[in-house]
Image (cartoon, coloured by chain):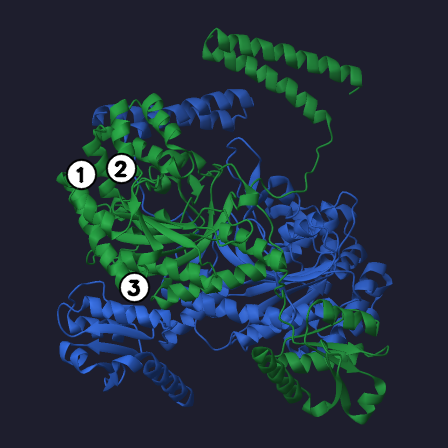
Chain colours: A blue, B green
Amino acid sequence: MSVVEKEALNDLIKQQGDIVRSLKAEKAPKEKIDEEVAKLLQLKAQLTEDEPHKFVLKTAKGTRDHMPAQMALREKVFSTIISCFKRHGGEAIDTPVFELKDTLTGKYGEDSKLIYDLADQGGEILSLRYDLTVPFARFLAMNKISNIKRYQIGKVYRRDNPAMTRGRYREFYQCDFDIAGQYDLMLPDVECVKILAEILKDLGFNGFVIKVNHREILNGMFEFCGVPADSFKTICSAVDKLDKLPWEDVRKEMVSEKGLAEEVADNINKFVVKKGGSELVTALLSDDLATNAAAKRGLEEMRLFFEYCDLYGITNKVSFDLSLARGLDYYTGIIFEAVLTDDGQPGETVGSVAAGGRYDNLVGMFDAKGRAVPCVGISVGVERIFTLLEARALAEQTKLRTNETEVFVASAQKQLVRERMKICSELWDHGLKVEHSYKQNPKLLAQLQYCEERSIPLAIIIGESELQKGVVKLRKVATREEFEVPRDKLTIEIRNYLKNMSSQQERA
Amino acid sequence: MSVVEKEALNDLIKQQGDIVRSLKAEKAPKEKIDEEVAKLLQLKAQLTEDEPHKFVLKTAKGTRDHMPAQMALREKVFSTIISCFKRHGGEAIDTPVFELKDTLTGKYGEDSKLIYDLADQGGEILSLRYDLTVPFARFLAMNKISNIKRYQIGKVYRRDNPAMTRGRYREFYQCDFDIAGQYDLMLPDVECVKILAEILKDLGFNGFVIKVNHREILNGMFEFCGVPADSFKTICSAVDKLDKLPWEDVRKEMVSEKGLAEEVADNINKFVVKKGGSELVTALLSDDLATNAAAKRGLEEMRLFFEYCDLYGITNKVSFDLSLARGLDYYTGIIFEAVLTDDGQPGETVGSVAAGGRYDNLVGMFDAKGRAVPCVGISVGVERIFTLLEARALAEQTKLRTNETEVFVASAQKQLVRERMKICSELWDHGLKVEHSYKQNPKLLAQLQYCEERSIPLAIIIGESELQKGVVKLRKVATREEFEVPRDKLTIEIRNYLKNMSSQQERA
């Protein structure tokens, strides 16, 4: 297409765009608008068809690669979290990354629009999982499991607006721990909160608070304040925004968008400003609110919860917060959310890093006979934790090793590649972590530099004369000290050196 | 809808189906056919609309859940493989589960039809990754990395015909190790084969062989035999089937389907039956085949490869096999495939469990300037290994523990839940792995049974009288021996018991 032709086409597109816009403005019949939109799209297609198909070198929007340094940090965080899950008797399970679309339908309230669907390529209609909770409930129902303490670490997918600098991605890991089974009130629930507190402490966070509330208290409060029963869910999702928006905005959403009476909204306001500990539970139990049966049940449970928190030594980390709502449809009992507070560290304002709650009816939704399995669980949002720890590592200039190589086999002269390979093979077969250069005749300096850059503790240096004497040179990379070691005692000598070095490091 | 109405509708559907079929048969205009197909689909929709929407409780075709026992085995296999990767200096990286569709296009030859696409939900056109190799090449090009030894463990997706009993799924894990960089001939390549041999040995397989061949030898052989240059790829993918089909079937595919001259096919047959070691390389180097430049280059490389295999002590595990072809488009040099042979174990005929090769041009395909990064790597197909190890575990009736709990805190009387919780909290805070019952007043027998079923080594039993004396009872679950231990020395005593028990196990 010539430049002139292209300009003409662009004009046509503009004209057609105006037609569509004016039809929309005058609210023309849908078929008429669709027809003109189709013409517009066809014109636009002509424009792009003409361009050579450009290959874009990037990852999908909202996703990213992880470099070795990031992976080293990730492995450390995962192993800390898994240790805690195992300390509480957790067993690992795994479920597929995609589910039948029907499995996910109707579980996420207003967030369902964020689910990724797979293309219909002639087969089942599938979607990528949105969290690990709904697949877990499907897993319990399908495999007829009525009690388990399971943990699962896996990626989940949300077509959300990514905010990568704040650790919000479209593909991200969740670390979940859930307790399923018919048990006594608050015993599994308080353990979940204890686990959350342990994990955050183990990861090195001191300033954090775990907000708790109860769906029954919320429902009771809505009823008590005069919210119509069929508006509970939508008002609940409005209250959920109070951690990001001021009350005035939330009130406006309730009244203008969701049609709540002004005085009802003001009633709600009196409650959602309340925060505290067990004393707030006691106060509310003597308040008029407790005349509402649901609120009373919830408050009684919270009283027990706070008593158990004392036994687990986590009371000072827990805050009863009537503004906590949690948008998801499936919660039925206690709900919680862990928020990092100011640790005096740079970039620490990441907000919520973990959340969870009780969902007693979700498994029943998958069971043909509606057989229920009560569940409570937590989900740790590790991406935000990574973002934070990466910022810390950067500020403190700490460097994690990205490999675990213990020995590098170097040669001081040419034509020694075969000798190097023989030594490598021997050491590998004895379980040592060993590298050598993939060049036939590398320069000694380049080989030693490689060791220093990668913090490899030991280097073996071989040369003709040493080989003839039946020895090799062993070098401590950090101090550059060198020792001669008998060739036939190499493995045992290396083991000794590594042992001494690591015990010296421990003492240092 | 009544049964009669339903029958009438079914008749209509049948009639309409006939109309569509006859239109197709007489090659009617496309619009006409589409119109009648639309009518047919509308009729069919009436039929299903009427039925209550049935929810099917299942995982997507070709995928499965993993139970704790499977996960325990998986973790063991992964950690064995990762240990080996780290022993060779590997660093971990991670890439997203989906890529821009363009990234995957044109890399998999005839297998491209098995790629899962994501639905176009208004955004980029995406596909699930088919392997970890192409994303790795994209990763290198995009992040401008010219040398790395990386490993990656992740799920990949193929819309293949699942054969779950033989370990073939649509979602499955691959464990990849690749060496990228401009290095000397065969040095990284032979290390990849060494790694493969180590992994299979570490996993407990004795009977295996690693078949090797070279794309340049294949190309040279095709040229030498008289295959037209533009048929190399399609003939290569026919040869690739020789491990599953007899020569006669492959010959038929070459001649009848792919139009190869009969005598050319027979020329190929003379080569593809050849198997052996370095002596075969020597023989072929004096054969007429070596007059072909490509074949000669490949054979020279194989000579060096076998020399290096000797140094790494893996010659007896390697078989030069001229029938090995590997269908994927991207290989350029050595190719290999590990096959389990009969270990005298039941169900051991799973065939190929790992494969790989050299792909020197793949990264260049992603680089705007075509800047190449030579690569060689292996991919371990762990699903087949799991299927095999699960069958072995079942045959040997070995049981892996699915939890790591060290101590269970039990109560012998009612009203002791708070005492149990205090002890749990103390032990957790000291890093011990502890469980207790989530019932307020569980029966002692039920608690002890739980310990036995789950092989928890120690139980603490608390009762009123012991608590008053300032002691608790410690019970070895396996032997049912019981000891009294001072309450204030509980943690240290438990540590000692666990230490003694594990050293006794080691001696046993």
Residue B194 horizontal side relative to residue A175, left or right: left
Q: Earlier in the sequence, mark 3 or mark 2?
A: 2
Real-space Cα separation, disc 3 to disc 2, in angstroms: 28 Å
Residue beneath label 2, please?
A: B271
Nearest the eye: B422 or B125? B422
Q: Are marks 2 and 1 in contact (CB under 8 Å)?
A: yes
Q: Earlier in the sequence, mark 2 or mark 1?
A: 2
Residue A279 horizontal side relative to residue A490, left or right: right
Q: Residues within 10 Å of mark 3 (few under 14, many from 20)?
A: many
Q: Chain of mark 3?
A: B
Q: What's under tag 1, amino acid-wise?
A: Leu
The answer to whether marks 3 and 1 sit on the same chain is: yes
Displayed quadrant of residue B434: bottom right
Q: Chain of mark 2?
A: B
**Is residue A303 visible from the viewing direction of this image?**
no
Residue beneath label 1, please?
A: B289
Residue B382 horizontal/vertical position (percent): 48, 53
Residue B284 horizontal/vertical position (percent): 20, 44
